[in-house]
Amino acid sequence: MKTDHTTRVYDSILDALPNESNPSPLVRLQRLSPSPTFPLWAKLEWLNPFGSVKDRAAAELIADLERQGKLGADQPNRGIVEPTSGNTGLSLAAIAAVKGYSMRAIVPQKVPDEKKALLRLAGAEVDVVTDALCPLPGTEDGSIGLARSYSRAQPDRYAMPNQYENPANVRAHERTTGPEIWKQTGGKVTHVFTSLGTAGTVTGLARFLKAQNPNIKIITVQPTEGHDVPGLRNLSQIGVSKLYDPALIDEILEIPYELAYQRAAELFRREGLRAGPSSGLIFEGARRVAEREQVGFGVMIFCDDVFKYMSTMVKHLPELATDEGGAS
């Protein structure tokens, strides 16, 4: 059957990946928006086929390796190795599985167990290393160093996409996320709120949107030092990425990381949005700007949902683990 986005009929799950013709949903907040003249809209990236905004980058990264001849029929024994805090690895593993490639994910020890289990469920081999919450540069036994070691020592077996340096990561969002937002808002968007990880999302969407309207404000949130929000970086950690372009960012808001979990719970309880903690942090930044400026049209990138983070949600909100009788 022919792919048809109107009837949601697909020959392959890969045909359901997001693009301008098949965008992830944009949903307006009803109860938590602080200003009626500054609506806040959530772009629900967990409704992508493999559950996060990283589906976009993963698809582009694999396609880039295929274009270069590093993956494909001519390389039947070669798969992928990549350092990841979870989401990119999961998207890579799922797309690789559909295409018949193997996947090895190098994961920091502090990544939630749910994400490690999901990586294995998707068919990835998982190496867990003592590293920061997100992969950082440094010794060869860290996440990034170990992945590079695999690709160098066994080039016939592993290709490394390298989400932190590969411009294909940025291109994915310049080609899909930015155009989707512009079309979905009818060009009315005035502010986009996102976070820092690899910086592929913010750089790509900002390049596209500022080319349409240079007055659009690109605002990122960063958690305070010592945070435990998987996948997020603050400015002290962003040096790992070669994709970060500060010239494209209009404001950086530092938010206490504990609010990531509190706001995620509020979004589910009051808006029905099962947002993960990074989305909670992004919402808090957007809420502050809307309250401050009062007039605007804000789009928030809600990167993934809460299910992969329940162990850390319970850590911050222990009442979630209490049964009706009061025993934990």
Image (cartoon, grey):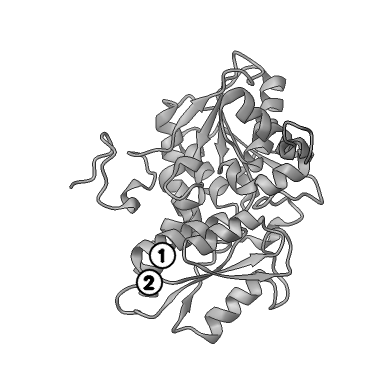
> Relative to 176, is 309 on the left or the right?
right
Name the outermost residue toward the left: 1
Residue that numbered label 1 is attached to: 96
Name the residue at 29% across, 75% down.
Answer: 73
Q: Earlier in the sequence, mark 1 or mark 2?
A: 2
Residue that numbered label 2 is attached to: 68
Looking at the rendered image, the disc whose residue lies closer to the viewer, 1 or 2, is 1
Name the residue at 61% across, 30% down.
Answer: 268
Is residue 139 depicted above or below 33 in this figure? Answer: below
Q: Quadrant of residue 238?
A: bottom right
The image position of residue 87, as x and y in percent, is: 55, 54
> Relative to 265, is 119 on the left or the right?
left
The image position of residue 318, as x and y in percent, is: 77, 39
Residue in front for this viewpoint, 300 or 101: 101
* Amino acid type for the residue under numbered disc 1: Ala
The C terminus - image quarter? top right
Residue in front for this viewpoint, 114 or 67: 114
SS at mark 2? Answer: loop
> Relative to 104, is 16 on the left or the right?
left
- Neighbor class of circle 2 (other Cα within 10 Å; few <14, some 14-19, many 20+) is few
Residue in front for this viewpoint, 61 or 105: 105
The image position of residue 95, as x and y in percent, is: 41, 60
* Amino acid type for the residue under numbered disc 2: Gln
- Residue 166, visible in the rendered structure: no
Name the residue at 54% across, 66% down.
Answer: 162
Name the residue at 73% across, 40% down.
Answer: 321
Q: In which quarter of the image is residue 24?
A: top left
Q: Which mark is residue 134?
A: none
Is residue 53 depicted above or below 243 in this figure? Answer: above
SS at mark 1? Answer: helix
The image position of residue 163, as x and y in percent, is: 54, 62
